[in-house]
Image (spheres, grey):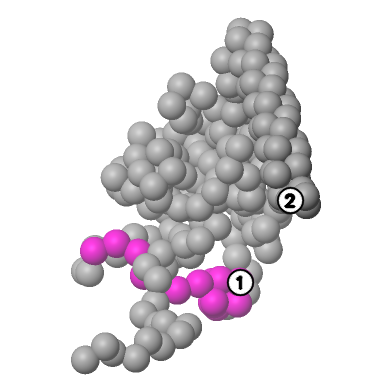
Amino acid sequence: MKTNSKFFILPIISVLLMFMLLRDGAVAVASEKSLLEEVKAVNEPFDSQSVKQVRPVTQKTVLAKEEYQGGTFRVLARKHAIERYKCSRCHLDKPVLVTQGLELTHGNVVINHGRKGDELGCIDCHHPDDRDYLEDKKGRKVDFDHSYQLCGQCHFRQKRDWLGGAHGKRVSNWAGDRVVYNCASCHNPHSPRFEKRFPATYSVPLN
């Protein structure tokens, strides 16, 4: 009488499968238990400022003189990028002895800032006595690195959005220290409106 080998193989396979399922279940329970214990052991709240920066900011920055949701943040510095700063190297309260001095020194500056017919002039933003500083509407000196304080006097809605992160751009990091672009990092302070331009890519109309 021949014995069918299937009757011997099937029970062995069933036992092996049951053993594997029990083993995987035990490992899963153990790993879940260890994870829960690890989470419960952490009493300190998550701090986004302690997250390691993947891409460090290499540009020069300064600590902002404004608060962001109760905390501090940094902005890109500007003075080192201004070609002719310090302005006091030329503005020494001495008489200009050359003709067309303004055209020779600032002829490339085109002011297109303000309402039509009531455009801003140099002294509307630059300090009349200390040219190394800007000046706000209350006569206070404003450092060039903190020009957002001056811009926010008129563009207060944009400044509010900028403080909250809805206007402007963040530099490099989504976590860690918050570093953002200054107003003048994107806008030309003398002609802040962006020129109209065609998009970089063209999408074919659907209809």
Furthest-front residue in this view: 1
Residue at 50 percent of width and 52 percent of height = 169
The stretch in magenta equals 100-115
Q: Does residue 37 appear anywhere in the picture?
A: yes
Amino acid on which disc 1 is placed: Thr
Which residue is disc 1 drawn over? 105
Q: Quadrant of residue 34?
A: top right
* Of the two numbered discs 2 and 1 in the rendering, the one whose residue sits closer to the viewer: 2
Toward the viewer: 157 or 78?
Answer: 157
Q: Is residue 26 above or below residue 140?
A: above
Residue at 47 percent of width and 83 percent of height = 200
Question: Is 33 placed left or right of 102 in the picture?
Answer: right
**Mark drawn on residue 4:** 2
Residue at 50 percent of width and 72 percent of height = 109
**Mark drawn on residue 127:** none
Toward the viewer: 32 or 128?
Answer: 32
* The magenta stretch spans residue 104: yes
Q: Residue 173 appears at what percent x and percent y?
A: 63, 45
Residue at 31 percent of width and 43 percent of height = 156
Q: Residue 184 appears at what percent x and percent y?
A: 51, 56
Amino acid on which disc 2 is placed: Asn
Number of dots carrying numbers: 2
Q: Is residue 69 above or below residue 180?
A: above
Q: Tell me which label, 2 or 1, sits earlier in the chain.
A: 2
Q: Residues within 10 Å of mark 1 (few under 14, many from 20)?
A: few
* The magenta stretch spans residue 1: no
Q: Does residue 31 appear anywhere in the picture?
A: no
